[in-house]
Amino acid sequence: MSDVSTALGVRLYPDLVELGGLASALALAATRCLVDVGRISAPEQGRSRFTCAELTCERGRISVALGSQARYFMIDISGVDGCRAHCDTTDLDQVVRIADAWRVGVGLAELRARFHFDHATEGDNTTVV
Protein backbone atom coordinates (compact mmCIF):
# COMPACT_ATOMS: atom_id res chain seq x y z
CA MET A 1 0.00 0.00 0.00
CA SER A 2 1.38 3.43 -0.92
CA ASP A 3 1.99 6.29 1.54
CA VAL A 4 -0.88 8.29 0.05
CA SER A 5 -3.41 5.45 0.28
CA THR A 6 -2.35 4.70 3.87
CA ALA A 7 -2.65 8.37 4.87
CA LEU A 8 -5.98 9.02 3.16
CA GLY A 9 -7.78 5.72 3.40
CA VAL A 10 -8.89 4.29 0.07
CA ARG A 11 -12.44 3.70 1.34
CA LEU A 12 -13.14 7.37 2.17
CA TYR A 13 -11.02 9.20 -0.39
CA PRO A 14 -10.35 6.98 -3.44
CA ASP A 15 -10.35 10.02 -5.75
CA LEU A 16 -7.77 11.84 -3.63
CA VAL A 17 -5.57 8.72 -3.44
CA GLU A 18 -5.62 8.52 -7.23
CA LEU A 19 -4.62 12.20 -7.52
CA GLY A 20 -1.85 12.00 -4.91
CA GLY A 21 -3.51 13.91 -2.07
CA LEU A 22 -5.74 16.81 -1.12
CA ALA A 23 -3.68 19.64 -2.68
CA SER A 24 -3.67 17.98 -6.10
CA ALA A 25 -7.39 17.26 -5.84
CA LEU A 26 -8.12 20.90 -4.96
CA ALA A 27 -6.11 22.10 -7.96
CA LEU A 28 -8.07 19.79 -10.26
CA ALA A 29 -11.40 20.83 -8.70
CA ALA A 30 -10.53 24.51 -9.18
CA THR A 31 -9.75 23.87 -12.84
CA ARG A 32 -12.96 21.85 -13.29
CA CYS A 33 -15.05 24.59 -11.62
CA LEU A 34 -13.23 27.37 -13.52
CA VAL A 35 -12.28 29.22 -10.33
CA ASP A 36 -9.08 30.74 -8.96
CA VAL A 37 -8.33 29.71 -5.40
CA GLY A 38 -4.93 31.36 -5.09
CA ARG A 39 -1.74 29.46 -4.30
CA ILE A 40 -2.24 25.86 -3.13
CA SER A 41 0.36 24.28 -0.87
CA ALA A 42 0.67 21.26 1.41
CA PRO A 43 3.05 20.33 4.22
CA GLU A 44 6.26 18.81 2.87
CA GLN A 45 6.52 15.83 5.20
CA GLY A 46 4.44 13.36 7.12
CA ARG A 47 0.91 12.14 6.67
CA SER A 48 -0.45 15.70 6.50
CA ARG A 49 1.20 16.26 3.10
CA PHE A 50 -1.69 14.16 1.72
CA THR A 51 -4.47 15.17 4.13
CA CYS A 52 -4.03 18.95 4.52
CA ALA A 53 -3.76 21.88 2.14
CA GLU A 54 -3.54 25.63 2.38
CA LEU A 55 -4.92 28.13 -0.11
CA THR A 56 -3.34 31.57 0.19
CA CYS A 57 -4.12 34.92 -1.36
CA GLU A 58 -3.94 38.61 -0.44
CA ARG A 59 -6.89 38.29 1.99
CA GLY A 60 -5.20 35.57 4.06
CA ARG A 61 -5.39 31.80 4.02
CA ILE A 62 -7.85 28.97 3.89
CA SER A 63 -6.79 25.73 5.54
CA VAL A 64 -8.47 22.52 4.42
CA ALA A 65 -8.21 19.19 6.21
CA LEU A 66 -9.91 15.83 5.83
CA GLY A 67 -12.25 14.05 8.19
CA SER A 68 -10.78 10.77 9.42
CA GLN A 69 -13.90 8.77 10.29
CA ALA A 70 -16.20 10.02 7.53
CA ARG A 71 -15.67 11.76 4.20
CA TYR A 72 -15.78 15.52 4.67
CA PHE A 73 -13.58 18.58 4.22
CA MET A 74 -12.95 20.96 7.13
CA ILE A 75 -12.47 24.58 5.98
CA ASP A 76 -10.91 27.25 8.18
CA ILE A 77 -10.62 30.81 6.85
CA SER A 78 -8.15 33.19 8.50
CA GLY A 79 -8.22 36.70 7.10
CA VAL A 80 -5.41 39.20 7.36
CA ASP A 81 -8.00 41.58 8.89
CA GLY A 82 -8.64 39.16 11.77
CA CYS A 83 -11.84 37.59 10.45
CA ARG A 84 -12.28 33.86 11.00
CA ALA A 85 -14.77 31.37 9.62
CA HIS A 86 -15.16 27.60 9.76
CA CYS A 87 -17.37 25.12 7.97
CA ASP A 88 -17.42 21.53 6.81
CA THR A 89 -18.63 20.11 3.51
CA THR A 90 -18.67 16.74 1.81
CA ASP A 91 -18.30 18.35 -1.63
CA LEU A 92 -14.77 19.10 -2.89
CA ASP A 93 -16.15 21.44 -5.55
CA GLN A 94 -17.83 23.48 -2.82
CA VAL A 95 -14.45 23.88 -1.10
CA VAL A 96 -13.00 25.59 -4.16
CA ARG A 97 -16.15 27.67 -4.70
CA ILE A 98 -15.89 28.95 -1.11
CA ALA A 99 -12.19 29.71 -1.59
CA ASP A 100 -12.85 31.56 -4.85
CA ALA A 101 -15.69 33.61 -3.36
CA TRP A 102 -13.61 34.61 -0.35
CA ARG A 103 -10.54 35.34 -2.48
CA VAL A 104 -12.46 37.80 -4.70
CA GLY A 105 -13.74 39.75 -1.69
CA VAL A 106 -17.03 38.18 -0.60
CA GLY A 107 -17.61 39.07 3.05
CA LEU A 108 -18.54 36.71 5.87
CA ALA A 109 -22.24 37.63 5.81
CA GLU A 110 -22.54 36.72 2.14
CA LEU A 111 -20.44 33.59 2.59
CA ARG A 112 -22.86 32.54 5.35
CA ALA A 113 -25.79 33.20 2.99
CA ARG A 114 -24.24 31.08 0.22
CA PHE A 115 -22.59 28.33 2.28
CA HIS A 116 -23.29 26.92 5.74
CA PHE A 117 -20.66 28.14 8.22
CA ASP A 118 -20.55 26.68 11.71
CA HIS A 119 -18.68 29.66 13.11
CA ALA A 120 -17.56 33.04 11.80
CA THR A 121 -16.14 36.13 13.47
CA GLU A 122 -15.28 39.59 12.26
CA GLY A 123 -11.95 41.23 13.14
CA ASP A 124 -13.38 42.50 16.44
CA ASN A 125 -14.24 38.89 17.43
CA THR A 126 -17.99 39.52 17.36
CA THR A 127 -19.74 36.30 16.42
CA VAL A 128 -21.73 36.71 13.24
CA VAL A 129 -23.21 33.21 12.87
Image (tube, grey):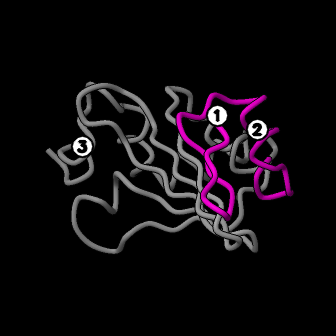
Q: Quadrant of residue 36?
A: bottom right
Counting residues from the N terminus, which is met first, the one under dot 1 or under dot 2? 2
How far apart are the alpha carbons under marks 3 and 2?
Answer: 25 Å
Please give the range of residues in magenta: 101-129
Q: Indicate the amino acid at tag 2.
A: Cys
Q: Name the side, left or right, on which 7 lies relative to 38.
A: left
Task: Pinpoint residue 121: horizontal percent, then vertical percent.
Answer: 62, 51
Task: Pinpoint residue 24: horizontal percent, then vertical percent.
Answer: 51, 54
Q: Residue at image x 66%, y 66%?
A: 79
Q: Are marks 1 and 2 in contact (CB under 8 Å)?
A: yes
The residue tagged with tag 1: helix, strand or loop? helix
How far apart are the alpha carbons under marks 1 and 3?
Answer: 21 Å
Counting residues from the N terminus, which is met first, the one under dot 3 or under dot 2? 3
Q: Identify residue for label 1.
A: 93
Q: Quadrant of residue 3?
A: bottom left
Q: Would residue 15 be counted in the magenta stretch?
A: no
Disc sitting over residue 12 in the figure: none
